[in-house]
Image: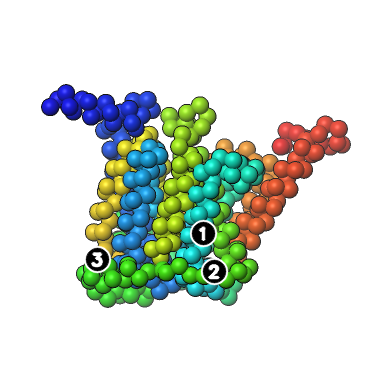
Amino acid sequence: MRSNDRSLRKSLDLYFHVSERSSTFRTEVAAGVSTFLSLSYIFVIHPFILARIGLEEHTTLVLTVVVSTAATLACGLWVRLPFVFAPGLEMSLYIALVVVPLLKLTTEEAFSLVIVSGALLCCLGNRHVRHYVIDSVPHHFATAVAVTMAAFLLAIALSFIGVVDYQTGHWTIAGLTNAGWAATGCVVIILCELVGFRPSVLVGIMVVAVLAHSRGALANSHATSFIPDLSVVLSNASVRAPFSTIHLSLQAAQALFILFVLSSYGSLSKLIKLSKGTTIVHRGDIPGVNRMFVLDGLAAIASGTTGNSNVTTFVESGVGISVGGRTGLTSVTTGILMVCALGLLPFIDLVSTAAIVGALVYVGVQFVPDNDALMDMWIGEKITVLIMVLMVLKFLAIGIAFDFGLFAFCLMSWIKPFLASPHLPGANSSNI
């Protein structure tokens, strides 16, 4: 028996490269548990967000768990990297608060665009295609995308507490009650983080939700039955989001562009940021990066097919990596535990708008690149990022921000060599 155990352990070690990446089985499992506890909040927030466009919350949770679990297990077993998959909060918000209400697309059209963006992502698994689509674009643009996504989440948080109404462009000092609940959630999250309690965001959401419910402050909640009818949930899941014909329009093209940028550059920035300085990187490269893009695309296709926003490489992967996770065993552990998220079904109806603001702020902070990435930018690039952020905070114009940023970064990559030339009067290459 012991011989069989040792043989199995050795086989797993070789397959997942545990020893090669200076890790241990215990560390990998612990990292997977920590990752699940940290990302568990998304299974409460995501259904609440998509409910704003008329999708039933319990059904959304079940479908989210199924797709997220499958993609995370595939990442562990196929890609063998410690990254996990879950709905991208920024993409859920973009569909629920911009694509459907502002761009006037139907939910079926929005999810069809998710499927198309997933197909495009699969193409990035070919390194030649990726070179022309991503690698040929100035690499600092990925940093700009990350900063802009952080600003987008902050802008949504401001709208949720009533500081700004982006449909009218009106800024107010209203919403003090919601602001108080939001601040309570932020404080709870910070306190949990300080004591190292991993499900800090989920706890922050639930504490505010329960307190607000007890005080009758759930104006934005729509609790009906505490125990969902699973037969209804499953019947709804079978008819979600049939593929819709996408009418060619400027709005559809803009939505597809944003979904693709959020997925591709968002995933790329997460992979680079979270792998930097770890044994995951081998000879300057992240092994399996081609498979990661294919898996990202397949997860998006599965999401859109089931009537969901993009399931993608999740930012909370950094939690497992920070505690030592280096291999696919971390992802496998997290994927198995994701099934436990179905236990949150009875609690979804308690969630209110103010309860999730703290989570938006927390996730937004996670998107901010490290100081080195920001300081490495040329002054012109920093100004471009600032303009992109202001566009989002003032007008929620994330599409225009990305269009402007991509054009500006490409233009600056062309003119910087001329500005750095010592033959030009006043050229100062040290600033580039």
Q: Amino acid at mark 2?
A: Ile
Find the distance from the CA under tag 1 to the CA under tag 3.
33 Å
Q: Amino acid at mark 3?
A: Pro
Mark identifier at residue 346: 3
Return the residue at label 1.
116
Q: Residues within 10 Å of mark 3 (few under 14, many from 20)?
A: some
Q: Looking at the rendering, in which quadrant would you find the N terminus? A: top left
Q: Quadrant of residue 341?
A: bottom left
Tell us which disc is closer to us: 1 or 3: 1
Q: Secondary structure at mark 2?
A: loop
- Visible in this render: residue 153? no
Return the residue at label 2.
246
Q: Residue lying at the far top in this picture: please name it.
A: 3
Q: Residues within 10 Å of mark 1 (few under 14, many from 20)?
A: many
**Relative vertical location of residue 341 with respect to residue 107 in this rendering, above or below:** above
Across and down, in percent, residue 20 comes to 37, 25
Between 236 and 363, the one nearer to me in the picture? 236
Q: Amino acid at mark 1?
A: Val
Q: Residues within 10 Å of mark 2 (few under 14, many from 20)?
A: some
**Relative vertical location of residue 324 with respect to residue 133 in this rendering, above or below:** above
